[in-house]
Image: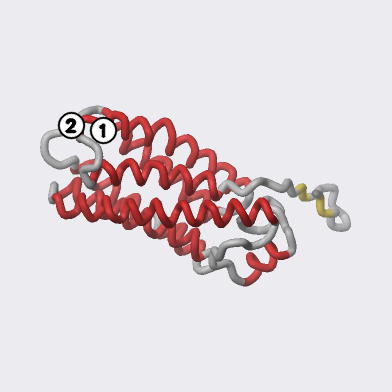
Amino acid sequence: MATPASPGRDTATVLRPLGTPVPLGFLALAGAAFVTAGLQLGWAAPAEQHAAALVMVAFAFPLQLLASVLGFRARDTAFGTAMALLAGSWLVQGGLLGAGPVPGSRHVLGLFLLVTAVSLLVPIAAAGTGKIAATAVIACAALRLGTAGLHELTGASGWESTAGVIGLIVTAVALYAAAAFALEDARHRPVLPVGRNGARSDAVREGTEPGERREL
């Protein structure tokens, strides 16, 4: 779809409809968050941490990175930034977890997780209240990173359990949001509430495709 060029200009803007990358990014987040929560809550033995690291590096990282690229192509800076930060966090966590147990707390990892959690406030602020479901997923992910970071810094088991519980919440919220956005994209209308409002909501109701509307 191309918009006509302005008088006196030889350029035109080409808009390409895209399938929304939101379900892909959120399902990748749900999978890795659930596996990590299983480790933190003792559902999986510590000896299985290498398998969890593989999930982070081979599953969550590439899928969320792809979702980030597609998000930027669809001109949704907030979503693209959030997915890129989360993709990088899984790569770092998986790399360190796969390296084997480290005596005591991982202070560098703890500091990294804390700054990543704070960094996620940027896309959260950019997204605002235009898509409450998506913002809630990113906010829960930031809270999980923050509590996991505190566990790595302090070694306190309470923070580890808290991070695990929040990881389960992240999984549930991400699965709901993924289903809601996937159904919306497939049927070209809202099916499950995602908290859209204003111009975003009008664009979806009018059947405007991702990549054509201003934001996902």
Can you tell which quarter of the image residue 131 is in?
Answer: bottom right
As shown in the figure, which amino acid type bears the numbered disc 2? Pro
Compared with 57, 116 (above or below) is: below
Residue closest to the eye, 152 or 184: 184
Name the spot of residue 112 as percent of width and height, x first.
29, 45
Residue at 80 percent across and 49 percent down: it is: 1
Q: In the image, which disc is placed on residue 59? A: none
Earlier sequence position, callout 2 versus callout 1: 1
Q: In the image, which disc is placed on residue 49? A: 1
Q: Which residue occupies the extreme front position in the image?
A: 43
Quick check: marks 2 and 1 in contact, CB under 8 Å?
A: yes
- Packing grade of label 1 (10 A; few <14, some 14-19, many >=20) is many
Name the spot of residue 31 as percent of width and height, x first.
41, 42
How is colour applied across the structure in the image? secondary structure
Residue at 73 percent across and 59 percent down: it is: 207
Q: Quadrant of the C terminus?
A: bottom right
Distance between the alpha carbons at the discs numbered 2 and 1: 9 Å
Can you tell which quarter of the image residue 206 is in?
Answer: bottom right
Name the spot of residue 127 as percent of width and height, x first.
51, 62
Compared with 108, 135 (above or below) is: below
Q: Which residue is mark 2?
A: 101
Q: Secondary structure at mark 2?
A: loop
- Packing grade of label 2 (10 A; few <14, some 14-19, many >=20) is some
Q: Which residue occupies the extreme bottom position in the image?
A: 198
Name the spot of residue 67 as percent of width and height, x first.
54, 43
Residue at 32 percent across and 51 percent down: it is: 167
Q: Does residue 165 appear left or right of residue 196 in this picture?
A: left
As shown in the figure, which amino acid type bears the numbered disc 1? Gln
Q: Does residue 161 appear left or right of residue 23 in this picture?
A: left
